[in-house]
Amino acid sequence: MSMSRQPARSPSAEGALAILEAAESLFAEKGFDGASINDIAHRAGVSKANIFHHFTSKKGLYLAVLKRAVAHSAGILAKGPPPADPAQSDRRLKQFFSEHLDALLEQPETTRLILREVLENGSESGQSLAEGIFADYFTRLVGWVRMGQEAGWLRGGFDPALLAFTLIAVNVHFFQALPILQHLPGAGFAFDSKTFSEQIFGLLMDGAGASSNVWEEEA
């Protein structure tokens, strides 16, 4: 039985990929200012002209690197439409939560690159990142939470964007705090990200679940 073959990339696509990979590595190591186009060209094995053929500027290349990194960390969000059955949104949310943490931990340099850009480069950069890179994935995640509310396994009455933000923020903080968590007494979960994902997701869903009345106002 013959195995199907993946379509071969064109030389142009291969060159662009080599540039992106080299740039991602150097930007993660040195930051935007510290990584020169000459360094990137040398590591990718291409000319400077070839870089500007694929990417209009150093900033354009940097944004392309960030988009690629965020698409990887977005995992299942980047792979297709939301579930057709709203009742399956809980499974997809749990899968996203687990895959997102895995992506952060598997590529720490790239994760630090994204966090550096988010934390250090001001409101103007924040607007550019929000509108050009994060908005689409965040909108999808909010949509999955809203589907859970519509299906009835999540309660209504809270902004679905809050839960979407919390899912992302918990994973990001776990990544950032991991060097300390691994030395705290009783924090055995720091050595088992799968268990961490399962238990934290359960805690969050208990709070957001349809049976919870923790946040309901008294009559």
Image (tube, grey):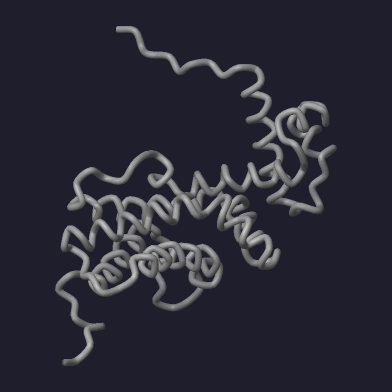
- Across the whole image, how many numbered discs are drawn on residues? 0
Residue 182 coordinates in the image, percent (x, y): 49, 69
Residue plotted at (66% across, 67% down): 123
Q: Quadrant of residue 90?
A: bottom left
Residue plotted at (20% across, 60% down): 150
Name the quadrant of the N terminus: top left
Q: Is residue 41 above or below residue 12?
A: below
Name the quadrant of the C terminus: bottom left
Residue plotted at (77% across, 38% down): 40
Q: Outermost residue, top direction?
A: 1
Residue 105 coordinates in the image, percent (x, y): 50, 54
Does the image show residue 11? yes
Q: Is residue 18 above or below residue 93?
A: above
Is residue 142 found left or right of 132 in the rendered image?
A: left
Residue plotted at (31% across, 64% down): 201
Q: Which is more toward the observer, 110 or 166?
A: 166
Is residue 51 found left or right of 195 in the rendered image?
A: right
Q: Is residue 202 above or below residue 129?
A: below
Is residue 183 found left or right of 186 in the rendered image?
A: right
Q: Outermost residue, bottom direction?
A: 219
Residue 98 coordinates in the image, percent (x, y): 37, 54
Is residue 217 found left or right of 133 in the rendered image?
A: left
